[in-house]
Image: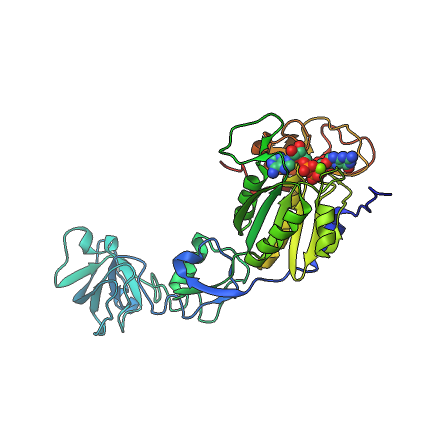
Amino acid sequence: MRFHREPIQVEEARERVLAYAEKNPVERVPLLESEGRRLAEPIQATNDVPHFPKSPYDGFAVRAEDTSGATPAMPVELEVVGAIACGDEPAFTVEAGQAARIMTGAAIPQGADCVIMFEMTTENEERVERYVGVKKEMEPGENIIQLGEEKKAGDLLIEAGKRIGPGEMAILATFGYAEVPVYRLPRIGILATGSELLMPEEPLRYGKIRNSNSYMTASQVRQAGGVPILYGNLEDDPDKAVERILMILEETDMLITSGGVSVGDFDIMVEVFNRLDAQLLFNKIAMRPGSVTSAARYNDQFIFGLSGNPGACFVGFELFVRPLLAAMQGKPEVHLPETKAILGVDMKKPSPFDRFVRSSWAIEDGRVVVYPVGRDKSGVVTNITDANCLMRIPPGGSGAAKGEEVTILQLPYNVGE
Ligand SMILES: Nc1nc2c(c(=O)[nH]1)N[C@H]1C(S)=C(S)[C@@H](COP(=O)(O)OP(=O)(O)OC[C@H]3O[C@@H](n4cnc5c(N)ncnc54)[C@H](O)[C@@H]3O)O[C@H]1N2
Ligand code: MOO
Ligand SMILES: [Mg+2]
């Protein structure tokens, strides 16, 4: 029974992780730096928008009752008593028989109740000086952006947890949020285990390979809103691993390792978890790839032991680490979005486990069609570049046939690039 581990279902593994998920502490950052972060508080309107009635056009602010009977052939003549630029606070009142020049975005003066565009006045023939001819009958309120028309003070504008992008930046600036409450970025330590590993700058030696997992994981962490901190490669030595892991956990919120989680002679992670006396959440999942993906709690921190095989390492992050990072940043929906797609080829390999196949979806004749990206072997590293989703093939039966409907988990990579 030396190698026996009790496999649990994917959903169960996710729940065991999320049961311990906590939101990161809140910090206030300058507006420009808040871009890409997640809001820690709901954002409300701090004033009406607009907070003064304003003109949507360049024209004349007038009293609608004065324009009665006006036509292009018989313009009504009004006295021009002032001009209002954007930013002015008009100090005069438009009385009966009067008009004021007004520019787009400028405040409506007292007395006026509508704005007539330049094009509907004698201004369109030659520039008006003292008197303007109005060529159209106006309604009260016409061409006025009313006080609070867009938003009222106190209105909820953005829910907490939303990622700050262009629209959110515009709102935050509009309502004077020079400092923005956001969740602190999760700092994620990344450590590769394996005596065969070289750094990217090192020349190849027979039997050795360059560590790609750490860089792949760093990208996944960053795209999930975390800050990756790389701690290099570690030989397969449990003593050194324990020492390094304790050091990394002091400096970071969480640790992700890759490699050494299976049952080989040099797979040290089981031993490492034992020596740390960590609380094991799982070390076997009924899925492929990534069946040996492991997770543990050490004090109040997480350690994820992802597979060494790059395909399995990639999938392990997407299914189990991503949701945790999302939860730490207050994201309301933590899992990858799922949709249905039509399988573009036969995937007839029967499997007793759920399979998560690195795949690519595209719209064909108005339908979402999905194809595996190539050889579905967890040791293959060079086809992750083509994946924009994971295709989920349920266990049992005889796999899935071309034309069948399958579930896909959309990845945030390789879409619209
Ligand atoms: N007898 C069994 N053997 C294996 C089983 C099993 O159940 N019984 N599971 C297989 C599966 S599935 C996987 S996945 C791997 C998991 O291996 P480990 O997580 O223990 O990883 P390693 O043994 O350290 O390495 C596996 C493979 O990946 C390469 N690797 C490791 N680290 C990196 C890295 N940072 N960058 C790129 N490539 C890396 C490593 O050289 C190996 O080729 O176990 C199977 N075996
Ligand atoms: O299940 Mo392994 O983790 O195929 O690659
Ligand atoms: Mg191994």
The residue closer to the viewer here, 403 or 101, is: 403
Left or right of 117? Residue 375 is right
**One can see residue 322 in this view:** no
- Which image quarter is the N terminus in? top right
**One can see residue 181 in this view:** yes
Left or right of 12? Residue 244 is left
The residue closer to the viewer here, 25 or 145, is: 25
**Residue reaching furthest front?**
239
Disc count in the image? 0
Look at 47% across and 71% down and name the residue there.
Answer: 154
Task: Give the x, y percent position of residue 200.
Answer: 51, 34
Look at 75% across and 37% down and name the residue there.
Answer: 264
Splitting the image into 4 quarters, where does residue 68 fall? bottom left
Task: Give the x, y percent position of residue 126.
Answer: 14, 52
Decide: is 233 above or below 204.
Answer: below
Task: Give the x, y percent position of residue 287.
Answer: 75, 40
- The colour scheme of the drawn protein is rainbow
Decide: is 37 above or below 293.
Answer: below
Q: Quadrant of ligand 2?
A: top right
Splitting the image into 4 quarters, where does residue 170 fall? bottom left
The residue closer to the viewer here, 198 or 398, is: 198
Decide: is 247 above or below 347.
Answer: below
**Residue reaching furthest right?**
1
Task: Give the x, y percent position of residue 17.
Answer: 69, 55
Left or right of 271? Residue 94 is left
Look at 64% across and 27% down and name the residue there.
Answer: 374
Look at 71% across and 39% down and name the residue there.
Answer: 266
Left or right of 402? Residue 138 is left
